[in-house]
Amino acid sequence: MSRLRLPKMGLVLLGLLGQQLALAQSVVLARQQSKGSRVAQAAEGQKLKEVLTDLSRQHQVSILFEETTVQGITIPADSRLRSGKLEKQLQSLLKPYGLTAKKLNEQSYYIIKTPSKESVQPAAGQPEASLAPSAEGTLSTLSSMAITATAPPADIRVSGRVTGENGEGLPGVNVVMKGSIRGTNTDTEGRYQLSVPNTGTTLVFSFVGYASQEAQVGNRTTLDVQLVPDNKSLNEVVVVGYGTVKKSDLTGAVAKVGETNIKATPIPSLDRAMQGRAAGVQVVSNSAAPGGSSTIRIRGSGSVNASNDPLYVIDGFPTTGLNSINTNDIESIEVLKDASATAIYGSRGSNGVVLVTTKRGRSGKTVISYDAYYGVQTVRRKIPLLNARQFADFVNEARVNGGGQPYFDGSSADQPLPSSLGEGTDWQSQIFRAAPIQSHQLAASGGSDKSRYAISFGYYNQQGIILNSNFKRYTLRANLDNNLTSRLKAGLTMQGAFTTGNNAKTDVDGNGGGGVTSSALSYAPNFPIYNADGSYYKNTGALNGYGVDNPLAVANEITNVGTTIRLLANAYLDYTIIDGLNFRTSFGTDLQSVKTNSYQTRLSLAGASLAVVPR
């Protein structure tokens, strides 16, 4: 077994250092006690990084430092941090470790840096014992020696000036080291100073209204940067009714929803695409059924009796019936929110206008794309209800408290003892399911400088979480544009849609037996699903106080199928009179055929109660 042996000189030095540390600590404690000043609570055993973080929060300033500078430094358990100004606290805290704090600007930001001092080394011929300082400065000197021996290379001081496109200084520009939170801001003249760890550091300059710029320090100590205005958002084109305009020239209140936001989530109709994505636009779902519609309010409701719905304009043609529009065909949605919309569309635009622009072809090679997604919808949480045994105990207790006899007394098969019952029937599990949802679209676009086209076919299928509820949509769209002459343009937008879906009976209609969800919550858990002959179990006795039907019978035997066939077409002619002045005329049609089939079989309570009319 090997043992670690230290040289005699090392043992002597360690012993001497221990004595000097003990002596220094006793002197520091004696001085603190003799002065009788108020002392802040000790930061015992904390890392230097944690103490600096606490000071930053306490004084509400930013203290910036490099990780390698404070790495491995722990405050001794017997040290005390005096209360008072932050500058004095930092000085007393950092001095023992050869560190200093420097104020950067008037915002009271501090940066911790290592002073450029040479390491303490014994002079030639000087004995090692002479390295021991006086008792008063023992702790500070020894700690400084330890930090100097392990301190990283000194930081590189970089300064410069940030200017705009005209050479003026930009105040408040963020100057941050890339990949970290270490940085500073420029002063009123656009000047800055920052310490970086090495020449490979990259600085990021960012300011509101200007494009961000990166610059590597390299061997430079002076780094000047000129920022360029960011005109991307100001040059964005917005549809405003008569045509398009740059966002920088826009004076009205307009909210825009782009294609990226529209395709972010699977949605059945374009009204859901605006939900939570347009300021001042409130979208509330009227129904959770597959393909259910929504109510849209732009800056609230403006009338009590009249309609508060906005006007929908698709490719320049006013229309309704948004469920038949394929959201994958939409390029952008603009919402005109202020009163200026009435100058374009009259009183119809008093509640706001929703402008929908579909995708059109661009000159170039033919582009074929296929978009698809698939998902599953489930019930987030079922309502907790009593099982069969708990329900029987509850009914018996209620009857006894009312002065009667227990109902479940074991006298018949329909009235067994509660102890003989188990979980019973979970009616919510019988009517709810994991419902798939899927969407597919195949599109082709392209053309030349004179003729452009965009054709797409879409299929959307959403199954409801209630049995036999669903919504399906088939769409075919063609957008054609043609430059007849250098000044005359013509175009055609045409869409055919076929939608069909079955709406589950969810409304509560009194004597009609109630909806499927209300039945599932009200039907007793001790009722079976089917009778012995396979028919639905029905109970109209005392335990069915609401008179609801078997929930599974409501879901399976009541259908309400709606079918819509729609043709939406719009053509236009556009003539350029002079540059910037166009004459445009358009005409279109919106043809819809809607059919609804409702049927209730006699296997359901509602169907059996209908009177039979003889021929």
Image (cartoon, helix red, strand yellow):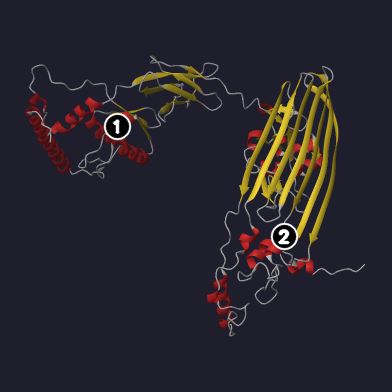
Disc 2 element: helix
Residue placed furthest toward the right: 615
Outermost residue, top side: 219
Give the mark, 2 or 1, whose residue is nearer the N terminus. 1
Instruction: Please tell me whether residue 220 is drawn above or below residue 511 in the rendered image.
Output: above
From the top left corner, tell me how far across and down residue 216 is, in percent.
43, 18
Residue drawn at x 63%, y 36% as measured from the top left: 261
Left or right relative to 44: residue 211 = right
Q: Is label 1 in a helix, a strand or a loop?
A: helix
- Whole-number angstrom distance, CA of label 2 to CA of label 1: 71 Å
Which residue is labeled 2 in the image?
Answer: 556
- Identify the residue at image location x=62%, y=61%: 428
Residue 218, relative to residue 47: is it above or below?
above
In this image, 249 relative to 386: left or right? right
- Which residue is tagged 1? 70
Q: Is residue 87 left or right of residue 417?
A: left
> Could you tell me residue 124's position as x and y percent?
10, 16
In percent of the image, x 44 and y 26: which residue is there?
178
Q: Amino acid at mark 2?
A: Asn
Q: Relative to the observer, which residue lies in front, 160 or 430?
A: 430
The quarter of the picture where residue 317 lies is: top right
Q: Amino acid at mark 1?
A: Val
Q: With respect to residue 283, does 87 lie above or below?
A: above
Among the 4 quarters of the image, the one containing residue 118: top left
- Depth order, front residue of 76/382: 382
Q: Is residue 129 visible?
A: yes
- In percent of width and height, residue 304 lies at 75, 53
Task: Name the quarter where the N terminus is drawn.
Answer: top left
